[in-house]
Image (cartoon, rainbow, N blue to C red):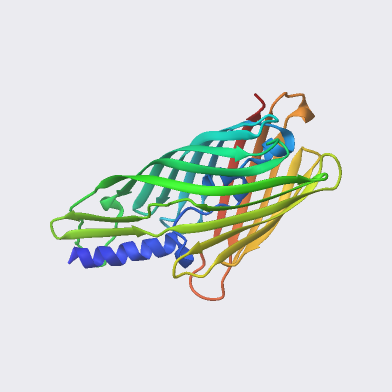
Amino acid sequence: MAAKNLILTIAATCWLQGLFAQQLPLFTQYREFAGIINPAYINSDYFLQEYNVSFGASYRSQWMGQPGTPRTIALRGEYVLGDRRSVGGIFGGYILHDQVGPTSSTGAYGRIGGILSSDPRDGGFCMALTFGAVQHRLDATAVNLVQPGDNLAFDQTRIIPDVGAGFFYYQRIGDNNIYAGVSLPQVLGLNLTYKNGDDEYDLKRVRHYYANAGYYLYVNEESFLEPSVWLRYVKDAPISLDANLRYRINDSFWIGTGASTNKSFHMETGVILGDNIGLDNSLKIGYGFDYFFTSFGPFFGSSHEINIAYLLER
């Protein structure tokens, strides 16, 4: 009956959401989302320019032109404690909402970590955790079943706890900087079953393993090149790798490009409003664009992402 058709519908939806079994949200400007990807990440705005407080908001629409495709909204804040002391810390949190067809998840997380370093502004090793809860929801009215006249008898939500963990290392080398980290953003995994009479919906989300690394190569006092990679692994799926190159010019704007092994091409650009217009603090506005290409199967279209961050020193 409906249970079988529902499984088929949800399977198709999950395939659309997580091509190559990637289930957690993807990001084009992933450096701007690094605190969500890895709770131990120390924002480059801190160790490059000493902005230790930041607030950000982002919106991503993926595979535009297709019905029910992913949309992601993120709100985040961060405070880095570190001023020539052997131990520093990172504190903050974020709210992440991800909508894919009839399914959605909304999570609220706190974030806390410690930095081992003689001077956190020059480098260090950070260990951190995220902790919170996620509401998973199925909108039965938005599910189209295979057989005409079939209707779902339930529209349910579940709230479950969630924990993430990460490690991050960063270091100044002469005038340049390196960084690298590993993380497990969803330690607990997920295995839920919604039931109402004969209707049943199984939701299983497996653990994701991430690694990221990059290098800041200064070409003058205010401009640098940043090659970076983001590696993602999910059990029983091919390893996915994003490689990008970003060029920041005179602390005023940046441009970047890259590609992923999941057959997508990236472009990004952004502006930085701060000293260049007489502000004590900084406002960053970035835009990212993905184009998915393949020689087989359906065409998914492009993805668009906008990111805004406000930075200050306290």
Can residue 148 be seen by looking at this rendering?
no
Q: Is residue 38 above or below residue 9?
A: above
Residue at the image position 52 percent from the left and 54 percent from the top: 26
The part of the image, by quadrant, that contains residue 95 is top left
Residue at the image position 28 percent from the left and 46 percent from the top: 158
x and y, in percent, of residue 281 in the image: 69, 26
x and y, in percent, of residue 205 in the image: 37, 58
Q: Residue furthest bottom?
A: 296
x and y, in percent, of residue 63 in the image: 51, 58
Q: Which residue lies furthest to the left in this view?
A: 197
Residue at the image position 36 percent from the left and 65 percent from the top: 12
- Quick one: quadrant of the C terminus? top right
Can residue 164 be seen by looking at this rendering?
yes
> Is residue 96 found left or right of 263 in the rendered image?
left
> In the depicted view, which residue is nearer to us: 203 or 49?
49
> In the depicted view, which residue is nearer to us: 185 or 198?
185
> Is residue 89 found left or right of 100 in the rendered image?
right
Q: Is residue 156 above or below residue 52?
A: below
> Is residue 68 found left or right of 254 in the rendered image?
left
- Quick one: quadrant of the N terminus? bottom left
Q: Is residue 19 above or below residue 141?
A: below
> Is residue 170 found left or right of 94 in the rendered image?
right
> In the depicted view, which residue is nearer to us: 157 or 191?
191
Q: Which residue lies furthest to the right in this view?
A: 220
x and y, in percent, of residue 107 in the image: 40, 42
> In the depicted view, which residue is nearer to us: 247 or 297?
247
Give the total number of marks visible in the rendering: 0
